[in-house]
Image (cartoon, rainbow, N blue to C red):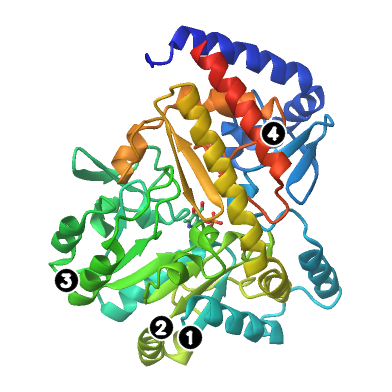
Amino acid sequence: MPPIDRAHLKSLMEREQKRFITEHPKSNALFDRARKSLLGGVPMNWMAKWAGAFPPFVREAQGAEFFDVDGHRYIDLCLGDTGAMTGHSTSATVSAINQQAQRGITLMLPSEDSIIVGEELQKRFGLPYWQFALTATDANRFSIRLARHITQRPKILVFNWCYHGTVDETFITLTDGVAQARRGNVGPPVDPTVTTRVIEFNDVDALDEALRTEDVACVLMEPALTNVGIVLPEPGYHQALREITRKYGTLLIIDETHTICAGPGGYTRTDNLEPDMLVFGKPIAGGVPGAAYGVSEEVAQCVSDRISLEDCDTGGIGGTLAGNALSLAAMRATLQKVLTQEAFDRMIPMAQRWTECVAKAIADFALPWNVTRLGCRAEYLFSSATPKNGTEAHDAMDFELERFMHLYAMNRGILLTPFHNMALMSPATSKEDIDQHTKVFREAAKELVG
Ligand SMILES: Cc1ncc(COP(=O)(O)O)c(C=O)c1O
């Protein structure tokens, strides 16, 4: 197929933008009002980046759908970028929240739920000891601090075009093989090239080279990249990575926040990984803020040897509301009753169907795109080759085309995960939802090539 005609794409986008504005008068009015009290008219900076002229304001959400203030229904394939992978407001989590909210929300003291959640996480991920935070970002930050403290090494290592939340050390990318602060890095406290080494995913030699100097405390990684499209590990990669990290005494932190899509114990369980530390946030409490990080027996021993009781509250690992009773009650219900094996048995076939239908449409319209799936998460990318590292995945991104696909879908009642082309399945996502997405995707493809 010849490259997408940009003039044609621009005119399609203008048509879609007009339609969006005409069909969302109430959201438009709320956005006008929001601009008078919220910076940029949105509660969080990235909400300004949705493909419409303004974001649709939400009236209510339930299961795999939500309604905006203008009365439009959406099939939600974004699911709060995994925060609502459970489906919105599932009854088990909501009832636990309701009950706990009436019995105390935050106390600075433990509840029995914390133990039940710790035991559940032990069973799922295989790591013996757990701590809680309010966000996956914080859980990553705390894990990095522990790794530095234990190893007494200054640096960390991440992968090109990774994302682990707003962790300062991770805002680093490679340009022509040279590490530099990631584009758009706002007010960095320190140049990330001082704190961090960055290499390509799936490159075993680069990892060996980067760790050889034995000054790297930890590797922080998603077992498959999920924030620049999906980049899967090549066969044998994880085994080689673990051997190299062990050889050089570097701790391995696996961030399962998104790759939990692989199954109830994340990619760690499906592929028998052996991390020293593991982070899991976003959907762990069904959308209530909460995150957890687990450590191995050896790490736990080093932590207790190196952190004194007198200093344990001021060492940079904290959060007054972390481990609060409400998020732990929500975690308990979510882990025990919602994100179960049975739920994954429903979600994964939905993602398979989504992937097969998108792949067929790509082939039928001869688009130079590809689609990749990991468990109940799938994503299409604007290149015909499947990427094997962050650079290849990032090179396949096309901001203009991506915005068109998102707006086209949004105008027809489908919400994709913004800033890339990802679809996530919840236990409530149905075959009909997938088939509706296929229909809309095919119509968009037809218009693009026509
Ligand atoms: C893999 C991964 N880890 C951590 C985070 C940070 O999560 P939060 O923004 O909830 O702190 C994200 C956010 O997208 C993520 O994708």
* Residue 42 in sight from this viewpoint: no
Say what amino acid the circle numbered 3 marks. Glu
The answer to the question of whether label 2 and label 1 lie on touching residues, with beta carbons closer than 8 A, is: yes
The label on residue 128 is 1
Q: Secondary structure at mark 4?
A: helix
Mark 2 or mark 1: whose residue is earlier in sequence: 1
In percent of width and height, residue 126 lies at 47, 80
Mark 1 or mark 3: whose residue is earlier in sequence: 1
Whether 258 is drawn above or below 77: the answer is below
Q: Secondary structure at mark 3?
A: loop
Which quadrant of the figure has residue 12? top right
- In the image: residue 136, left or right of residue 244: right
The label on residue 436 is 4
Say what amino acid the circle numbered 4 marks. Gln
Q: Residue at x 68, y 32 (%)?
A: 55
Mark 3 or mark 4: whose residue is earlier in sequence: 3
In percent of width and height, residue 325 lies at 72, 76
Q: Secondary structure at mark 1?
A: loop
In percent of width and height, residue 426 lies at 66, 53
Q: Quadrant of the N terminus?
A: top left
State the separation of the CA atoms marked 2 and 1. 6 Å
Residue at the disc numbered 2: 296
Estimate how packed mark 2 is, as few (under 14), some (14 to 19) or many (20 or more) residues with alpha carbons within 10 Å.
Answer: some
Q: Nearer the viewer, mark 2 or mark 4?
A: 4
In percent of width and height, residue 140 lies at 45, 65
Mark 4 or mark 1: whose residue is earlier in sequence: 1
Q: Nearer the viewer, residue 373 or 12?
A: 373
Q: Residue at x 48, y 63 (%)?
A: 256
Residue at the disc numbered 3: 214
Q: Nearer the viewer, residue 184 or 213?
A: 213
State the separation of the CA atoms marked 4 and 1. 43 Å
Which quadrant of the figure has residue 38? top right
